[in-house]
Image: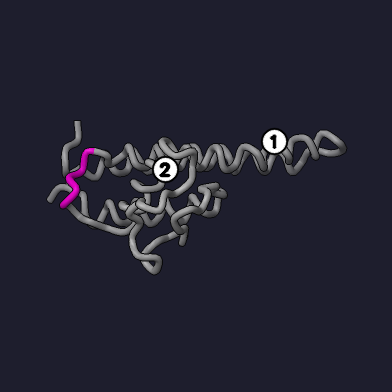
Amino acid sequence: MPGTSYDRAYLEACRAQVAERTTAYADLSLAAAAIKGSARTRVNGALVALEPLLFNSLVVVLDTCFARRDAGIAACPALDEVRVLAVAIVGNDAVLHDDDALPAPHDCVLGLKPGDPISLTENDFRRLATAYFDAAERGLLAA
C-alpha cells in the first residue's frame, strides 16, 4: 500500500481510473447530443444535473489517490486545493467554509473562495485533475 511516496505505476493507474470516468461522461454527452425530439430535452436535463454530482465525487476520488501523503511532503497548491475541496464536498454539503485552508487565490486552479458552492463542470474537473496529477508527478513520486 502506498505511503508518503508513490511509484510511477501507481500514479498512472490513478490517472487512468480518472480518465476512464471522464471519458465515460464525455461519451454519454456525445450520445445524448444525437438524441432527437423531446427525449433529448429530458436527457440533456439529466446530464446537467449529473455533471456537478459526478465531478464533485471525482474530486473525492482524486484526493484518495494520494491521501496517505505526509502534510509536509510536497506542499503544492493543486494537491492542497483538491484536499480542501474533497473535505468540503464530503463534510460541508459542497460549500467551502470560511476556515478552509485554500491555497492563495492566484495558486488555485478553480479560483473558489470561502462560502462558494462547489459545483464542478467537466472542464473544471479536467483542469483540476491535470494540475493535480502534474503536481503529484513532480512531488510525490519515489526517487
Expressed as whole percent of the image width and height from the top left, the position of residue 14 reads 34, 39
Q: Can I make out residue 33 in this image?
A: yes
Dot 2: within a 10 Å radius of its alpha carbon, few (fewer than 14), some, or many (20 or more) residues? some
At a point 35% along the width and 56% down the height, the residue shown is 102
Circle 2: residue type: Ala
Expressed as whole percent of the image width and height from the top left, the position of residue 115 reads 48, 53
- Whether 40 is among the magenta residues is no
Comes first in the chain, label 2 or label 1 = 1
Q: Name, please, the residue furthest toward the bottom.
A: 106
Near-viewer residue (43 or 12): 43
In the image, taking residue 123 as reference, residue 97 lies left or right, namely: left
Q: Quadrant of residue 77?
A: bottom left
- Distance between mark 2 and mark 1 Cα atoms: 24 Å
Near-viewer residue (88 or 31): 88
* Comparing labels 2 and 1, the label whose residue is closer to the camera: 2
Q: Which mark is residue 46?
A: 1
Near-viewer residue (2 or 116): 116
Expressed as whole percent of the image width and height from the top left, the position of residue 8 reads 24, 45
Dot 1: within a 10 Å radius of its alpha carbon, few (fewer than 14), some, or many (20 or more) residues? few
Q: Can I make out residue 17 in this image?
A: no
Secondary structure, mark 1, is helix
Circle 1: residue type: Ala
**Are the residues flagged by discs 2 and 1 in contact, CB closer than 8 Å?**
no
At a point 49% along the width and 50% down the height, the residue shown is 125
- Residue for badge 2: 88
Quadrant assignment for the N terminus: top left
Q: Quadrant of residue 7?
A: top left
Q: Which mark is residue 11?
A: none
Magenta residues, dominant SS class:
loop
Q: Quadrant of residue 114?
A: bottom left
In the image, taking residue 93 as reference, residue 106 lies left or right, namely: left
Q: Which residues are magenta?
A: 68-72
